[in-house]
Amino acid sequence: MIVDTSEVKAFAAKLQAVPERKQRRVSMIVKKAAQNVKNETRSDLTSSGNAAFRHIPISYEMSDRGSVVEADVAPDDGGAGNLANLAFFGTAKGGGTHDFYQHARAEFPNLVRELRRAAMGL
Amino acid sequence: MSGLTHIEARRRILNMVPACKGWKRYEDVAQSGKDPPWIVLKFIENQRLTTESLAVTTKLATLEIRVVGDTADGIGVICDKMCDALQGVWPGRPFGRISLDVDSGVYASELVSTVTNLPYLMRVLRFRVSWAAC
């Protein structure tokens, strides 16, 4: 008896490729979220009345370790980056009117929605 | 309605902040002409949750505690005391529990000590608290 197993083999190959493909997609989603947080934070800073705050650089680093995908969004060290604490938390007397964590929080629902979409199907 | 006014909410939350001997305590802004160490407290009602018909159900506020001092250890002791007194604590009805939202970590402030010629250090803790508006 001849059994055509080509479709089963194709399905098996598809299944085998799923983790790698999904992980690539998850990495892309996390990267996009980090980029959005960076853009929002930068646009918040560029609207500052303080000229030095407008030049605070924000960047992110991606870290992909197997099942853990991380993006670390932070102001750069050195130069105007050293003013980040003053911009986000203020001086000894008050201030700290620019948001940082809030932009990440606002992005979080989008990240969850996209990850949920990525987790569905093959 | 819970009938809790902004002033009442502010008073109840600020009363929970422990006194720290040797540290001047200011509300909203530090006094000009004075030198640290000090603690600046700020209570800001900054968010409202509403129903579909825009009736306010919950009000949220941030309690900002700005600790400015000479040494990181000194600031650490005060912040530890603040967290012990506030983190997860329930102020009573109609409030929810207080939660620590943001901790800036210690960084150099713009003020320089005239005694040591070193910048004063500071740390900002932001707590969140909510209360029922109806």
Image (cartoon, coloured by chain):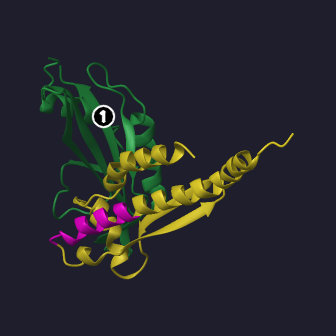
Chain colours: A yellow, B green
> Residue A42 colored magenta?
yes
Neighbours of disc 1 within 10 Å: few (<14), some (14-19), many (20+):
many
Residue B41 sits above or below residue B50 on the image:
below
Question: Is residue B112 rendered to the left or right of residue A4?
Answer: left
- As drawn, which residue projects farthest toward the front? A1
Query: Which portion, as a residue range, is magenta?
Result: A35-49
The residue positioned 36% from the left and 28% from the top of the image is B97
Residue A110 sits above or below residue B118 on the image:
above
Q: Is residue A46 visible?
A: yes
Question: Is residue B9 rendered to the left or right of residue B75?
Answer: left
Residue B113, image x and y in percent?
33, 71
Q: Would you name the residue on which mark 1 appears? A: B129
Q: Quadrant of residue A40?
A: bottom left
Q: Nearer the viewer, residue A23 or A56?
A: A23
The residue positioned 24% from the left and 35% from the top of the image is B60
Question: Is residue A48 rendered to the left or right of residue B109?
Answer: left
